[in-house]
Image (cartoon, rainbow, N blue to C red):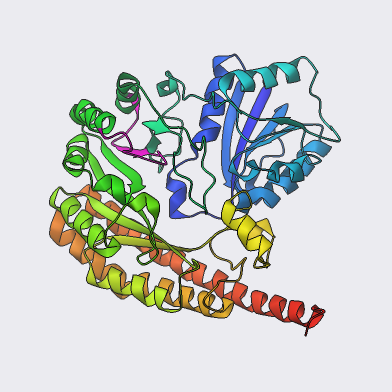
Amino acid sequence: MKIDIYHVYLRFQVNNMVYPIAPKILQHWSESHGWETRTMECVESKVDYSTDADVIAFSIYTQTAKSSYRIAEKFRKMGKIVIFGGPHFRGGVYKEALDKCDLVATSVSEEQWISILDRIASGEIASGSKRAIYQEDSKNEFRFPDDMYKTVNRKKWYQWSLVPLSYGCPYNCDFCSPFMGGKYLTRDIDVIYKEMETAKGEYIFIPDATFGLNTKHTIETMEAIAPLKKKIMIETSMIRMKEPGLIKALAKGGVIGISVGVESLSTKMKKHGSGDTKDILEKIVNEAHEHGIAVEGNFIVGLDNDTETVFDEILDFFKNSNIDLIVPGLLLPYPNTKIYSDLAKAGRIIDTDWDHYNYMHAVYKPKRMLVEQMLKGYIRLLREISSPEMVYRKSAAFYRRNGFSKETGIYIIGNVLKMIEGFQDRWDISDNCQEVLLRLEEQEANSPIR
């Protein structure tokens, strides 16, 4: 039996330089039990319909759900067995897919995945089901394979290898639906070392949702992998970076870049702890720079406390601080989160087209500004941070700190690509602004209360 596992993109972005890990794990499990498997990462137009695979599986995020549904419909007409899984189906959202595939899963363990494939091989699960089977790893039995080092190098030439240190997330953020929420586990350091050692090339990305939560495990891991001389990128929260000695340990382990989830400079997040967000972030940036580590800040705009001033606040911080990059995104109320439920109950969800759940569309009404104000403010912010002048300014500062090196080249190239993406993003958002205003006018005209 042959299996194709898809991760569909809307379009290529710099983020695609890190491959999705879920399809690789499914591939590893499948091949470990004798099934011929390949993973496919592509846009909808590049799907391979000539495949002789018996099973087509999709790892689906909300913004690619409709694309995956369209692709799956074609495969089902060809008699293929179709499996859906991924973050989009957490909560009750999986119900929308029950007539579009043969099995839908919110999550699976290795034992469950192999059981699914065995049932397909035996004919128990067949193509063309009117209502899909539902599968869930309700006991959180998922574990990363200890021998995943065997497949860590199956990636495109431009992609970084992925090596997780932990999994699960104990936080309960309103705007997030985490994998293995409420649970946090660390991996064996010897296993991590083996994967790092085996990974082809220098560059590694650690995809932990809550990197550094276990400080002792993190520091011990960094000390263990230091002799490998890898170049590592991580993503984490500000409160983790406040731990004494952690940044120094990260530098020793080979970390060259930190992506910090700031979310907001004004709205207090429990997971960030107490203190002034700007002051904390500035201290993190300066200490990281002392150890040769670049810092990217990720922001969310459109929170209930945000007014039109939020865009200038973020821009001013970017201009006047030493932070290397910022990535702002519109608040995205994923359909399986508390914030979506709250906004829906308040009548503030204005768009349920999953194609638009990509940080580039207004799908809800903000509380303290108009939709048009939010979109135009966001366009202005993107234009400023991705302008040639700003890209040159930040690249020059990076060069002054780090000199001519491979990391400097990667940073500058990444910055230029972000600038190019910024032009495309602003075009997309501008189009959406007109669409949203027309939709709101129509809703107002059709409202029974005038």
Please tell me which residue is depicted at 58% across the width and 66% down the height of the picture: 361
Query: Is the stretch drawn in magenta largely helix, strand or loop?
Result: loop
Instruction: State the quadrant of the C terminus.
Output: bottom right
Residue 164 visible from this viewpoint: no
Q: Is residue 419 left or right of residue 446?
A: left
Camera-side residue of 100 and 276: 276
Is 121 magenta? The answer is no
Camera-side residue of 179 and 254: 179
Q: Position of residue 255 (x, y in %)?
A: 24, 41
Q: Position of residue 264 (x, y in %)?
A: 39, 63
- Farthest residue to the bottom: give it: 450
**Vertical comparison of 366 with 23: above or below:** below
Q: Quadrant of residue 313?
A: bottom left
Camera-side residue of 171 and 217: 171
Please tell me which residue is depicted at 52% across the width and 38% down the height of the picture: 179
Residue span colored magenta:
198-215
